[in-house]
Amino acid sequence: MILALETSCDDTCAAVVDGPRILSNVVSSQASFHEQYGGVVPEVASRHHLQLVNAVTDAALSQAGAELSQVDAVAVTQGPGLIGALLVGMSTAKALASAVRKPLIPADHLHGHVAANFLEPDPIDPPFLCLVASGGHTLLAGVSDHSSFETLGQTLDDAAGEAFDKGARLLGLGYPGGPAIQRAAQEGDPAAFGFPVAMSRDPGLDFSFSGLKTALVYRVRELGEERTAASVPDLAASYQRAIVDQLVVKLERALDRGGWGVVALGGGVAANVELRERAGQLCEAREIGLKLVPLELCTDNAAMIAAAAAHTEPIPYPDYLTFDASAQAANLAV
Ligand code: KG4
Ligand code: ZN
């Protein structure tokens, strides 16, 4: 049984997980605090984590009916993420683990998004191809074993979730942008505006979303305030279509290279209904499996960190006391 903490961005998360079984998975979102700024303010996030982390941890243990002394190890996101936010989780996890002389397991956040697929309901085992698309990262992960993944392609600039967030801010739809754009897009026509699907002619597996955001800036400027306000649903639907098109084109290209019998989606953008549907159509056409985790396992949570930690080497007490968090992704440091 693993107690895991996740504080890499603006959600304060704790979970208790036993193998593939989630005994509790508590998420305290700070989104409403950051909404007024149109995005996450790192210093504000760190302060909120400090205020919330103990209560969230207590809630996770009590919902699981477990005492701290009963857990086998304490897992924590080591990185990548906002360094101040990560340090709150790391310091708390070190304190909790050392209080009961248990091992600490540092986990990679992106490995966590991949490892969400190892959890109930319907856990899967490697090999599979995983598209991880979140607010901070967008990458195609070749997953051949439980303990790691290979980065087959990644974004060269903005992440897909960042594109949703920036687009939503431009359209006055609030934060987080993904759910807001998805909502607005329901009433809109995805063919109303032509947005560039970047990298679609590029033969590689990398992504790029910054040009799309710039295209939206120009379109909003051309339309002017009134026409933009009247066209929000069409703009949102067309913009969402361009993001999803690029993700699906690259997924398709990775499948063309062969060898994958199952596709999985991870990260906050994997909660997007259009992406889930389009990935479904793609996998059906190719007669391969599609694994979609429940929405609460797409966005940041600590159960996925426990799932990654279950396949990561624990550090015995007290060797981890000098251990640090890291803002950079170990897997992406190519
Ligand atoms: O994985 P996550 O919770 O945090 C990071 O690791 O970044 O992802 C958050 C991102 C945000 O950019 C948010 O706008 C996006 O996921 N997101 C969505 C949806 N729900 C969350 N994007 C598109 N459609 C959604 N339904
Ligand atoms: Zn994440």
Image (cartoon, helix red, strand yellow):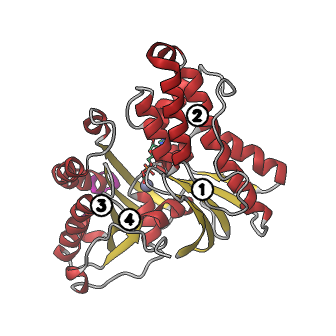
The three-letter amino acid code for the residue at tag 2 is Tyr
| Mark 1, secondary structure of its residue | loop
- Residue 40 visible in the picture: yes
Q: Which residue is drawn at 23% across and 60% down?
A: 84
Q: Residues within 10 Å of mark 2 (few under 14, many from 20)?
A: many
Relative horizontal placement of residue 308, taking residue 175 as reference (left or right): right
For disc 2, the marked residue is 239
For disc 3, the marked residue is 66
Q: What's the distance in space between the residues labelled 3 and 2, CA to CA?
A: 45 Å
> Which of the two discs, 4 and 3, labels the residue nearer the N terminus?
3
The three-letter amino acid code for the residue at tag 1 is Phe
Mark nearest the camera among 3 and 2 is 2
Residue 250: mark: none
Q: Residues within 10 Å of mark 4 (few under 14, many from 20)?
A: many
Q: Where is residue 151 in the image (x, y as percent from the top left)?
A: 58, 69
For disc 4, the marked residue is 80
- Placement of 97 over or under 36, stated as above or below: below
> Which of the two discs, 1 and 4, labels the residue nearer the N terminus?
4
> Which of the two discs, 3 and 2, labels the residue nearer the N terminus?
3
Q: Residues within 10 Å of mark 3 (few under 14, many from 20)?
A: some
- Residue 294 visible in the picture: no
The answer to whether residue 212 is magenta is no
> Which of the two discs, 4 and 2, labels the residue nearer the N terminus?
4
Magenta highlight range: 61-67
Q: CB of mark 2 within 8 Å of CB of mark 1?
A: no
Q: What's the distance in space between the residues labelled 1 and 3, CA to CA?
A: 43 Å
The three-letter amino acid code for the residue at tag 3 is Ala
Mark nearest the camera among 1 and 3 is 1
For disc 1, the marked residue is 207
